[in-house]
Amino acid sequence: MSGLLLAVAVGGAAGAVLRHLAAARSGPHFPWGILAANTAASFLLGLLTAGAAAGRVPGWAFALGGAGFCGALSTYSTLAYDVVRLAEAGERRLAAADLALTLAAGRAEAAAGAAVPRLP
Amino acid sequence: MSGVRRPGPARAVTAAVACGGALGALARYGLGTAFPAGPDAFPWTTLAVNVSGCLLIGALVVWLVAAEPHPLAGPFLSTGVLGGFTTFSSFAVEVEGLVRLGRPAAALACLVATPALAVAAVLAGAALARRVRRAR
């Protein structure tokens, strides 16, 4: 197994476990844990992507932290499933709020992370 | 009290999530390597990964409820494999990248199409799985 694949696998395992722990801590009403995981991963991946573009993040570190950890810490399947689940339970406002908050916070954090390596 | 130490349920669930997460991340990485999107191109690979993962989770939840498989199958497949396979962070960073590269129309298309297709895919996956179940 090449080193990069090992890095992706290790980062992916760690990201998935952290997301699982975050999800387990939020109650059944609103998936705060997944919102937090997606937001934090967007910030970190924005930072790593900009750092890699600037030549300051080596390939193995991007595979471990970006493709592996951030990719697995964040999720689209659970987000979309939660939106459907909340809507089908009659909680249409919560479903819309979950999606809107995740999109807004994720985009803002990706931009914030990308701005960090450009700071003087 | 046999004295044999077996992993507690919480520890076994965490291990299943970790293994699934590693496999899901590797599958996503493999697809990203096979179909790389240029920095200024529309991120089709991430869209395809996320929509297919959402289709699968819709079907998976129907199957988990109906088939009652091993209790670790849910955490392994849903939280682990599909959670590790799909990614919100790549989507967010790629939308941000399109904005920064002066492609607001592509960024908006990605920002709107991905969640719409993701939710539709969950519904479609669940509907397909129910139809397959009824047909058997």
Image (spheres, coloured by chain):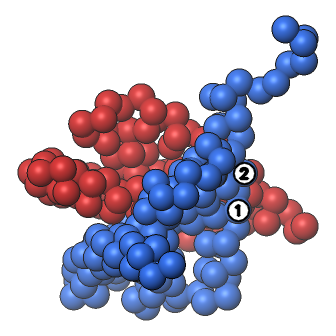
Chain colours: A red, B blue
User: Which numbered circle lies on residue B23?
Assistant: 1
- The reply to whether dot 1 and dot 2 touch (C-beta < 8 Å) is yes
Judge the density around disc 1: few (<14), some (14-19), many (≥20) Cα neighbours within 10 Å: many
Q: Nearer the viewer, residue A37 or B24?
A: B24
Q: Identify the element where label 2 is drawn.
A: helix
Q: Position of residue A57 (x, y in %)?
A: 65, 59
Q: Where is mark 2, residue-wise?
A: B19
Mark 1 residue type:
Leu
Mark 2 residue type:
Cys
Q: Which chain does the numbered disc 2 sit on?
A: B
Say whether residue B42 is visible. yes
Q: Position of residue A76 (x, y in %)?
A: 41, 63
Q: Quadrant of the N terminus of chain A?
A: bottom right
User: Based on the displayed image, in which of its 4 quarters is residue B115 positioned?
Assistant: bottom left
Q: Residue at x 79, y 66 (%)?
A: A5
Q: Residue at x 27, y 54 (%)?
A: A85
User: Which numbered circle lies on residue B104?
Assistant: none
Say whether residue A119 is visible. no
